[in-house]
Amino acid sequence: MACLARRLSVFLIIAGFISLWELGRPVTLSAAEEIAPSPPSFEKRVNVKKGLVAFVEVKAEEPVTIYIMYSTQYTKYKATGSADGILEFKNITWLIYPIPALMEEQTVYFVSFVPKGGPKREDILLYTLYEDIHARIDRLIKGEEMLRAGMEMAVAGGTEVIRLTPLIPGLKVRLDFSGDTRFVIVKTIDLARYRKGVKSFEQLYEESDLKGSEKGINFSTTDFEDLYLIVRTPGPIRVKSAIHATKESAESGC
């Protein structure tokens, strides 16, 4: 029974993060404390009926920041302007975000803010594709690999931390960089040590197996812990990631 419950939780994760597009997306998530006082340049509501998963694609010619809010968060945001605990995707030019509605209908709001001189409202495009959750899970169990999550973002230079959210073993991850850069992929505990100054970028780079100074890397996840990409580059680059779900990732819950 415990195994069954765990498998259901894994399926919920998978169903919420499988996508159709061929290349995609990192996942830069952070908990913002407060949204800038300027009005949003873009605001859309997406409704998803029970039994479906919606894949929301956002495109922008220039980098934008996207806040993703469920109904209670959106109500609080409208009343107070606070974005505490809200998903924040910074400096993105392309994003596909999945919204699963396995147990009940879901409503999610996409609110974007742009830097001064950035793209106009009409230059930020949003498309939504709906799929049956159970049909997608069946395809995965039968051995088909499918994109689970991803994003493209702009890094101006210096050091940037990007959160990857695989969550389960057996996923295939592809990271691509538009130029040569030094990068290292670490777990939560090492990120905490890095942010507290206990470990330097060079120490993490020396100790990690997932690192490089080229334009890309492929690897598979081995446990349930989130990973963080630390990028160090002398100039502007674009970072793109694609996370594929596999049969192994579906079966890793038991």
Image (cartoon, rainbow, N blue to C red):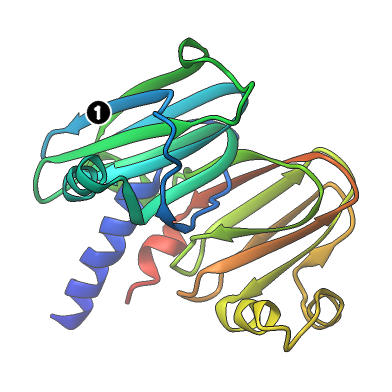
Question: Quick check: can you spot residue 173?
Answer: yes
Residue type highlighted by circle 1: Arg
Q: Please give left or right for residue 85 compared with residue 8 in the image.
A: right
Where is residue 214? Give x, y as percent.
88, 52
Q: Secondary structure at mark 1?
A: strand
Taking the spot 52% from the left edge, 49% from the top edge, the residue there is 244
Q: Residue furthest front?
A: 37
Q: Is residue 53 visible?
A: no
Viewed as shown, does residue 217 lie left or right of 85? right
**Residue 148 to residue 252: above or below:** above
Quarter that holds the C terminus: bottom left
Q: What residue is rendered at 44% in x and 63% in y?
A: 249
Q: Position of residue 146 (x, y in %)?
A: 46, 43
Q: Quadrant of residue 205?
A: bottom right
Closest to the observer, 146 or 106? 106
138 in relation to 23, above or below: below
Q: Nearer the viewer, residue 121 or 224?
A: 121
Residue 219: quarter of image: bottom right
Marks counted in the figure total 1
Q: Residue at x 56, y 22 (%)?
A: 60
Residue 148 against residue 225 in the figure, above or below: above
Front one among 90 and 190: 90
Using a 10 Å C-alpha cutoff, classify the residue at mark 1 as few (fewer than 14 neighbours), some (14 to 19) or many (20 or more). Answer: few
Q: Between residues 136 and 201, which one lies in front from this camera angle?
A: 201
Q: Quadrant of the N terminus?
A: bottom left
* Residue 151 in the image, given as x and y percentages of width and height: 56, 40
The residue singled out by tag 1 in the image is 45
Where residue 71 sits: x, y (%)?
Answer: 17, 44
